[in-house]
Amino acid sequence: MNLKLLINIAKTLLMARFRQTLIAAIGVMFSITMFITLISFMTGLNGLLDGLILNRTPHVRLYNEIKPAIKQPSNIAFPNELFLVSSIKSENVRKDIYNSASVIQFLKQDERVDGVATKLNAPVFFTIGDIKIAASVSGIEPMEENRLFKFGDYLTGGDLKSLIQESNSIMLGKGLADKLMAKIGDVVYLNTPNGDRYDFKVVGFVQIGIADIDNIQCYASIQTTQKILGKPSSYVTDIQVRLKDIKQAPSVAKEYAQLFNLDAMDVQTANAQFETGTGVRNIITYAVSITLLVVAGFGIYNILNMLIYEKMDTIAILKATGFSGSDVKWIFILISMIIGVAGGVFGLIFGYLLSSVIDNLPFETQALPTISTFPVNFNVAFYFIGITFALVTTYLAGLFPALKASKIDPVIIIRGK
């Protein structure tokens, strides 16, 4: 088999039907372009939505859950009697994590752990004259919170370091700040459920993008929050763990719960519904994208079928002059592959260009103030999948017509003429 000669014959046949060849190549190019654009945009959007929730969610959260007491007073007083009890009394469980320093030290030595950050929540009230606005202060380790959970990405004003450098400083959720009509540098007044009153300087605003959180949440350093509650420096209610491999979260959470006798919540359980939605969107994206490529393959198949019927004489002459059925088969496969390569390469180029245009389109929403353009995921794997699928599709589309051409009997064709 003289490959160079077969390629020249394939090119000659392609140019003889240049318009049909161009249409087939454009079909492949359009399919690859839309595949790259659609999958890049949809996965970018999914990544944005995932990050909105998952970036702020620890892979494993250790805490003490308030639970109904197993032994109620009635059971203790009358152990042999059966009672139907309503308004069950909760178990007298401490909210903070016992011996938290040792727990944190153990976690940091675990090779599976990427980082650990402590957290403390405190219910408070802000006062504007006679009006009280319920809120919650999250005591955080600002720099660790930023490193592990990208806290800084949600700042719409101020500097994260201010929580550490300035005493009695606080960052307000954007919705809460609007209620208080507070600006950076203003002083807001905070009351605890115990009746203590504190004044705090506003050093920044945070907008997670979820209104229910932004309307009540504010942030301070964990030391400041401990002072609000009148607790010692060892008092923490949550230990947030980020793992190197998020897929290990469910098993690691169970292990830590037994090891430390604490409640543990893994990120998959906490966001099960959200992850299900992401999976469904990804399935739809891939299904639509692959359908485009398959449709282009049928177009190539039809064009090659027509080409075989129109080139019966040529095929007969080739066979009569010594070309084998295998040679004829490879001529038509080469025709298909040339269309696939040309359409695929240009499809990748135009897909990248169209994705870049979308990536630079302005996207402004009050829910996501830190996002200025539409999210696009320029993952090289998508381009590899696109060109691979284009080649495979066009090869299969050309294979069946090629096999048909290889079986044509030149004697019958020439005798008919």
Image: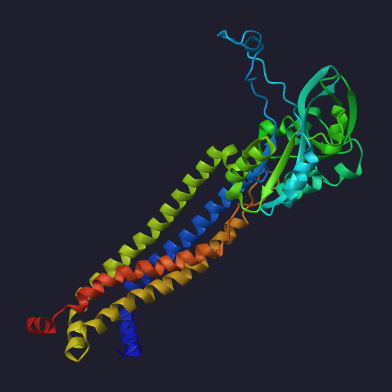
Residue 365 is at least partly visible in this image: no
Of 349 and 386, the residue lying toward us: 386
On-image quarter of the N terminus:
bottom left
* Residue 396 on image: x %, y %: 31, 68
Q: Please give left or right for residue 292 compared with residue 400 in the image.
A: right
Q: Please give left or right for residue 39 compared with residue 18 in the image.
A: right
Q: Is residue 393 above or below residue 259?
A: below
Q: Is residue 327 above or below residue 373?
A: below
* Residue 361 on image: x %, y %: 61, 54
Q: Which residue is found at the position 81% from the left and 28% from the top?
A: 180
Of 14 and 111, the residue lying toward us: 111
Q: Quadrant of residue 98?
A: top right
Q: Which residue is found at the position 32% from the left and 82% from the top?
A: 10
* Residue 139 on image: x %, y %: 80, 36
Direction left: furthest residue: 415
Q: Tell me, what colour scheme is on the image? A: rainbow
Residue 305 is at least partly visible in this image: yes
